[in-house]
Image: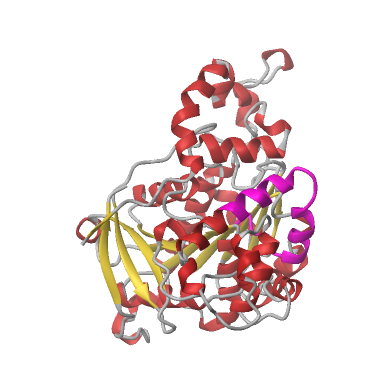
Amino acid sequence: MAAAAPTPSPFVASTRRFAPRLRSLIPGAAMSPAASSAPNPSSGAGEEAQAQAPPLPHSTLEIAGARRGVLSGFASLRTPYRAFPVLALNRHVETIFAAFTRSLPAVKLRRECLRGPDDGAVALDWVAGDDRALPRDAPVLVLLPGLTGGSDDTYVRHMLMTARRKGWRVVVFNSRGCADSPVTTPKFYSASFTGDLRQVIDHVLCRYPQSNVYAVGWSLGANILVRYLGEETDKCPLSGAVSLCNPFNLVIADEDFHKGFNNVYDRALARALRTIFKKHALLFEDIEGEYDIPKAANARTVRDFDEGLTRVSFGFKSVDDYYSNSSSSDSIKNVCIPLLCIQADNDPIAPSRGIPREDIKANPNCLLIVTPKGGHLGWVAGDEAPFGCPWTDPIVMEYLEYLQSEKNSSTKNNIPYDQQGVSEASAPHLTVHVQT
């Protein structure tokens, strides 16, 4: 059955309206990545200096983790991290510029809805036609957007297209209410709840039992992903994962969220949460318990929404109890599959001081890259800056392909897939089609 395309976010609409104008305002020299990285002839730098590249990974990046040596072969890390001129002067400028002006790659998606054990529903957006175009054993990549995000967000689309060009099968996991995902019960999703993700991954594994499955999460999606990895420990069915701009410690993130310019993000996200809630407000009519529905419906901050609705839905005594017990920083020590975490040191929403650096260093499965700039969901740097994919996409893809290569050379691929413990049962689902 045909369904309308997800409603574009204000950020997407603004991209189309303002991008041409911004291009005209940025000098041509600044638009060229080579301009920011070209050697200065007066300094004696040239081809000879370029030939004497510094050891990899480059010293402009903070690298931590027992397996950091694997990054030394990544072509995407051969040059210093150079944020795009002008934008890098302020973390908020870079964050907002990326949100409003990053291009939105066009792709036709096919939607599949899964109904959970509690009768709730989530939406999976697959690339249309890939079932026929790709081999059954092509690696699968599950994408988890940030809070209120979905398959119509620019950073998600760019990662989808990057992986697809490499022959990967990609699916976007739209949480309840996001990207027009249906809401069928008086319950949305939270930073602590991994049940929907667990169902999605089990469903993907059942559908493609010959494939290795990986996951990439951003912001709140990254927090949920890392919590899932920690809960699954050595039983995790994923072959690898990447966490991007993860707030990690939600108590610290909440503290910083109410400071200075961060209030702008807080209000914007609260507005997005109110919009999702109001579409489904009738589901919460006459609901019993500690819910404060008026507070959620009129939330001016994310904390207001979480206090009125989220923390009650998921059984927490208070919003502080919810944040304290939903932080993925506590899960790192239990991660048993390869995990790459990429953070920006100047991220206004995922503070650098919340990164569990010591736990990452102590876990042989984890790697950490911290860039000096990047903002939140920004990373306006690299060959496609300022309007193309984030700087992180090539690194993420190289890392995933490295893991896939390792898997292909391992003994696991010599075992028939019907002996790998994959259940034949699949969650009930309904497929619809989405044109975007």
Say which of 229 and 421 sits in front: 229
Is residue 187 shown left or right of residue 370? Answer: left
Say which of 66 and 25 sits in front: 25
Residue 249 visible from this viewpoint: no
User: Overall secondary structure of the magenta stretch?
Assistant: helix
Q: Give the image location of residue 436, x and y in percent.
A: 32, 47
| 251 inside magenta stretch | yes
Is residue 394 shown left or right of residue 210? Answer: right
How many numbered circles does the render carry?
Answer: 0
Q: Give the image location of residue 69, x and y in percent.
A: 63, 57
Residue 276 position (above or below residue 375): below
For image coordinates 69% across by 39% down, the residue present is: 92
Magenta range is 244-271
| 81 inside magenta stretch | no
Q: Quadrant of the N terminus?
A: bottom left
Is residue 19 shown left or right of residue 411? Answer: right
Q: Give the image location of residue 295, x and y in percent.
A: 66, 65
Task: Residue lying at the far top in this picture: please name it.
Answer: 42
Is residue 310 shown left or right of residue 136? Answer: right
For image coordinates 66% across by 58% down, the residue present is: 368
Residue 14 visible from this viewpoint: yes
Q: Quadrant of residue 321?
A: bottom right
Say which of 253 and 229 sits in front: 253
